[in-house]
Image (tube, grey):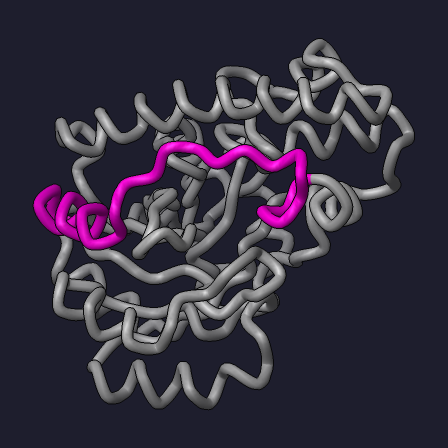
Amino acid sequence: MRIDPHTHSTASDGTETPTQLMTSARHAALDVVGLTDHDTTAGWGEAAAAVPRTGVALLRGMEFSARHHGISIHILGFLFDDADADIQTHCRRVRESRVGRARAMVERLAADVPVNWEDVVAQVSGNATIGRPHIADALVSRGVVRTRAEAFDRFLNPRSPYYVPHYAPRATEVIHWVKKAGGEAVFAHPQAPQRGRVVPWEAFEELAQAGLFGVEIDHRDNAPESIPCLEKVAASLHLARFGASDYHGAGKPNRLGEHATSPAVIEALTERCLLEVIYP
């Protein structure tokens, strides 16, 4: 069984609708795919409706923006009740914060490169929250850069003078919300230096004490030299090993199924959660 638990759709910053994502998962010969859009569960319903037609099971999740002692990190929440009040409040606050942050970044960029707010809005599908990937797509459309990756490298990374931070709660708080809502939490791509500062190894113990279930070890953005330490830390703290593509469609080079999670880990995950995987 091939399981890719971390992907994105147009509900956040992917380029495929939830339906298209499920179809792509079938073409990639996946048995289970996780839809984990950034700070929204808006794509769950559409993806679930595509399960019978595609024959691909759906693992419902969300990628939470969070911080650990000032360092930006991402926490994957799986199979939780998305009607939980704390999670709803979080999603609303992130949405409001991201729009203001995106406007501020575009204003900074516009002083040096040919891009404006209308260019960015034109890149957004449906009700997706505007974020850095949409700014990147606008820069590509304008011919400032060739790819999203180049836009992030040159203009949108945390070290750039154009970067503006956004609201993000403490990671331990996010883990608490997810578990209170009947789900489990996984630390996404924890050793990805190209994304900005990475947490010290001591952070894993603090997150584990807060109730962290697993760590995304097999991910293309984790520095290869960090994998042995990640394996050792995860084993010592009894954290499940996750692997995933972090697929965004045409927006990134990540390919569906390029990394996967074992069926035993997903079985252990579902046994602890309120919701279930939606099977065909």
> What is the quadrant of the N terminus in the image?
bottom left
What residue is drawn where x is 40% and y is 55%?
A: 71
Q: Is residue 176 magenta?
A: yes
**Highlighted magenta segment, given as a residue range:** 156-183
Left or right of 76? Residue 100 is right
Image position, residue 94 (x, y; %): 37, 28
Q: Name the image quarter holding residue 44.
A: top left
Q: Between residues 17 and 224, which one lies in front from this camera angle?
A: 224
Q: Overall secondary structure of the magenta stretch?
A: loop
Q: Name the image quarter holding residue 136.
A: top right
Q: Is residue 180 magenta?
A: yes
Q: Between residues 136 and 186, which one lies in front from this camera angle?
A: 136
Residue 60 visible from this viewpoint: yes
What residue is drawn where x is 30% and y is 46%?
A: 278
Q: Between residues 35 and 229, which one lies in front from this camera angle?
A: 229
Residue, far left: 180
Q: Between residues 93 and 267, which one lies in front from this camera angle?
A: 93
What residue is drawn where x is 26% and y is 30%?
A: 90
